Amino acid sequence: MKITHLLGIGATVLSVAACTTNPITGRSSIQIANNSEIEAMALQQYKQTLTESKVITGSQAQSVKNVGNRIKNAAEKYYASIGRGADLANYKWEFNLLQDKQVNAWCMPGGKVAVYSGILPITKDDTGLAVVMGHEVSHALAGHGNERISQSMIAQGLGTASGLAIKNERTAAIFQSVYPIGSQVVLLKYGRNQELEADQMGLYLMSMAGYDPRQAIPFWNRMEATSSGARPPEFLSTHPSPGSRVGDIQKNLPKALEYYKAAGGKI
């Protein structure tokens, strides 16, 4: 039997064994990397970023923490309600506002969140922040980092059916390519499908946390307007087109409004 055929069989077996289903969106993905080691590397990168950045304190920073904690609590409550509370057991949440003109925000695996001050004029209020933070937290909860790393591992023949520990330079380099954290540029390289899923999941999470999901469309319209036909902010660089995004939000609004009403929101 040819080696390429054997590799194909191995990849198929691996895909079936490592298929993960998002409990909020129902989307399935292949995640073979070791989450504990991804989170350890993410923590290291997060600490480096905080060391190299100016961490803002005061009322704006408190808003970031308040919104983040409400979304975190909503996620934990939902996961516990469906018997998947263990999925978030190792998360060590942290929410920081960083002084930086970039229009950006991100959440590392394990719950480490950074919001850049450059995005605050666009978020405008806590509900706008909830759109952004719900989206970014969803990337982490959905395991998008693991998915991206796993795709690279499989392509390079690094995966095994029992899971893969990140203990060598090649896989560490893969992590760095997915999470190129630095003091000047932060761009988590997610794909379009992952961005769409984060939109949907983030919409639901902000609703569960008691924020009006109908405000997501005005936020994304404001975000798009910042590009003025020029190069979009990093936050939008791999995201769907504005029309596609708004259409998907409108499609998901009825369910989001159910979550919002259940959280005490007024319809």
Image (cartoon, grey):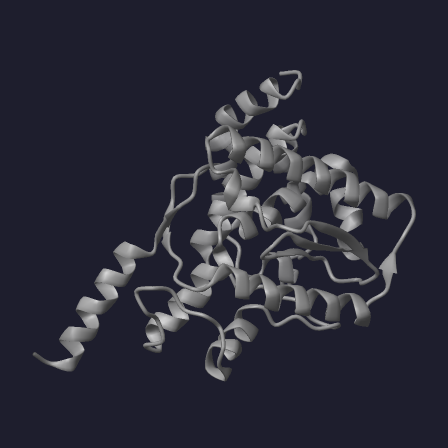
As drawn, which residue projects farthest toward the bottom? 169
Figure quadrant of the C terminus = top right
Q: Position of residue 91 (x, y in %)?
A: 61, 50
* Residue 107 falls left or right of residue 204: right
Quadrant housing residue 264: top right
Rendered residue at 50%/83% (across/down): 169
Q: How many marks?
A: 0
* Residue 81 falls left or right of residue 26: right
Rendered residue at 43%/60% (across/down): 147
Quadrant housing residue 33: bottom left
Q: Position of residue 167 (x, y in %)?
A: 49, 77
As drawn, which residue projects farthest toward the left? 1
Q: Position of residue 76 (x, y in %)?
A: 59, 36
Rendered residue at 78%/54% (across/down): 96
* Residue 103 to residue 68: above or below: below
* Residue 146 falls left or right of residue 27: right
* Residue 209 falls left or right of residue 194: right
Rendered residue at 59%/56% (across/down): 236
* Residue 24 to residue 4: above or below: above
Q: Position of residue 239 (x, y in %)?
A: 53, 55
Figure quadrant of the N terminus = bottom left
